[in-house]
Image (tube, rainbow, N blue to C red):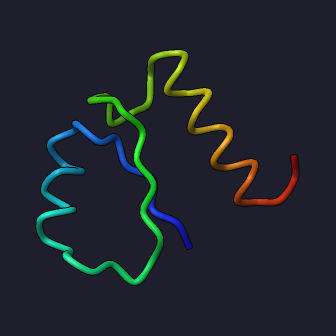
Amino acid sequence: MTILLAERDNTAIAFRAAVADPVAAVMTCDTASHSFAPVSDAAWLERQIVEGLGTD
């Protein structure tokens, strides 16, 4: 399992503070958009999902 976070999003920041040693891998996108709405963020999110599913 991999957790995908928007690096500058307040919820992601709180998550990182609360979970010092997550049991899953954590990957971050350099954005404040928790919905990954900007085109570059959406492309990053899609790449992570495709790679995670192994269906590239």
Asked if 34 appears above or below 41 in the picture, the reply is below
Please say if 15 is above or below 13.
below
When asked about the image quadrant of residue 15, the answer is bottom left
Residue 36, image x, y percentages? 44, 30
Whether residue 8 sits left or right of residue 40 in the image: it is left
Rendered image quadrant of residue 30: top left
Query: In this image, 12 relative to 41: left or right?
Result: left
- Residue 44 x, y percent position in the rendering: 58, 34
For the N terminus, the quadrant is bottom right
Position of residue 36 in the picture relative to residue 40 (left or right): left
Say whether residue 20 is left or right of residue 54: left
Q: Position of residue 9 (x, y in %)?
A: 22, 38
Residue at the far top: name it.
39
Q: Residue at x 45, y 62 (%)?
A: 3
At x 45% / y 55%, what residue is drawn? 27
Q: Residue at x 33, y 78 (%)?
A: 22
Where's residue 6, x and y in %? 34, 41
Q: How many marks?
A: 0
Residue drawn 57% across and 39% down? 45
